[in-house]
Amino acid sequence: MTSPKKKKVAMLFSMSFLPVQGRYLRTYNEAKTLSDNGYDVTMIAWDREIISPEKENLNGIHVERLRIPAGFQAGPVKNLPKILTFYKRAIQRLWKSDFDVIHCFNLDTIIPGLLVGRLKRKKVVLDLCEPNYYANWKPIFQPVYRLINFFEKFFSRRFDRLFVHNLYQMDKFGKFGVKSLLQIGSYPNLSLVVNEVNARRDSESVVIGRLGSIYHDNGIEETIEAFQMIRKKYPKCRLLLAGKVFAKYKSTFEKLIEPIRDHLILIGQYAPSDMPELYSKIDISVMLYRRTEFFRNVTPTKFFDSIASGVPLVTSDIGDLRLLTTQYDCGVIVDETNPQDICRGFETLIRDPDLRRTIAENGLKLAREKFNWEAEGRKLLKSYESL
């Protein structure tokens, strides 16, 4: 008796599918879950830097990279010819193979994926990570941004499935009239969830940590000012900063950290595999984002990484974070524009080790039971089976 033919899935990704890219883990986990459960998965990626192998196999995932040089920060006008080239080559690649499902990641893969899928009468899936794409564009491009909102609304209803990241998106696309809508979060694997909360330090020697890229006006200024305030009450506190410092911000950043150098643990750019070790070094995770048009509806993956590491958070009120922290008592919400309020958030956790441990344990329980990739992977497979 012959075994059933494997279903073939083509995944379209507009980056080169590397571990250093922010959306990589979600994309990889979805591809790996499907591959491990009997699907033949091909990742068609866009290698903008021309530095990766054109073809390779990553843990059962066939990766084919379309080598089209382009920048990430060039803007819509300069990048348009490159995007059109990507569309052309992606359509050619999809057309010559008989895939059963075309899975599109993010807005810039919609046109080639949907066009080929509908012409060949195949199932098409859209996977949107960002709540509002390109909302951080300069004001001159806002008319284009409004057009993209219409584009998103129009095309999202034409896919067989739509996967989104958070509750804001569920509400947004529900109002658009999308029927086959499913929330699949970008959560850590259970292998990254720690066994117990790290509570080895006393209140006097607490380490406050911030993981993520460092650039102008993304909370780093307020974090450092609040840290200087809290040190007046707890002089043995230290601040850990890990992440790439953007080139344009380096000179400003050096001046900013000068007063706290003796109390600062500075770690540069890190790989995703380094995060468990980094979180093990800190007692309080600070995660501040301005409530801009782009960030106010984002639910950062760092929230889930932090609770999986047993570390309580001081965070701003963006995305689903207020709901999650209040419903499950796993963090403290502060006004990210007010260093005094951030300092009060630090002190709430520093002065009460028992509260700090309770909040950390609440988050860790949540990661074990709900916010982990294994749980999300089961949802993904069930949705695919119903296709």
Image (cartoon, rainbow, N blue to C red):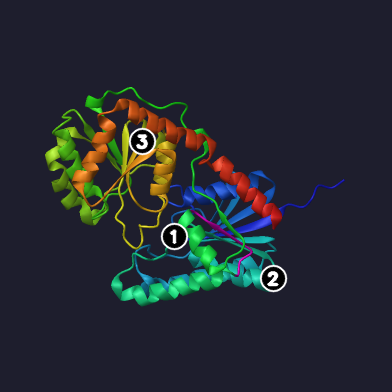
Residue 264 appears left or right of 1: left
For badge 3, the amino acid type reads Pro
Is 159 a magenta residue? yes
* 353 versus 181 height, above or below: above
Residue 37 appears left or right of 231: right
* 156 versus 343 height, above or below: below
Is 357 a magenta residue? no
Q: Quadrant of the N terminus?
A: top right
* Disc 1: CA contacts within 10 A as few (<14), some (14-19) or many (>=20): many
Q: CA distance from mark 1 to mark 3?
A: 25 Å
Q: In the structure shown, which secondary structural element does the residue marked by tag 3 occupy?
A: loop
- Mark on residue 131? 1
In front: 318, or 150? 318
Farthest residue to the right: give it: 1
* 358 versus 249 height, above or below: above
Q: CA distance from mark 1 to mark 2?
A: 30 Å
At 42% from the left edge and 37% from the top edge, which residue is drawn?
307
Please report whichever mark, 2 or 3, sits nearer to the chain's N-terminal start: 2
User: What residue is disc 3 on?
Assistant: 312
Q: In the structure shown, which secondary structural element does the residue marked by tag 2 occupy?
A: loop
Please report whichever mark, 1 or 2, sits nearer to the chain's N-terminal start: 2
Part of the protein shown in magenta: 158-166
- Residue 237: give x, y in percent of width and height: 21, 31
User: What residue is disc 2 on?
Assistant: 120
Residue 349 appears left or right of 187: left
Does the CB distance between marks 1 and 3 fall below 8 Å?
no
Q: In the structure shown, which secondary structural element does the residue marked by tag 1 occupy?
A: loop
Q: Quadrant of residue 276?
A: top left
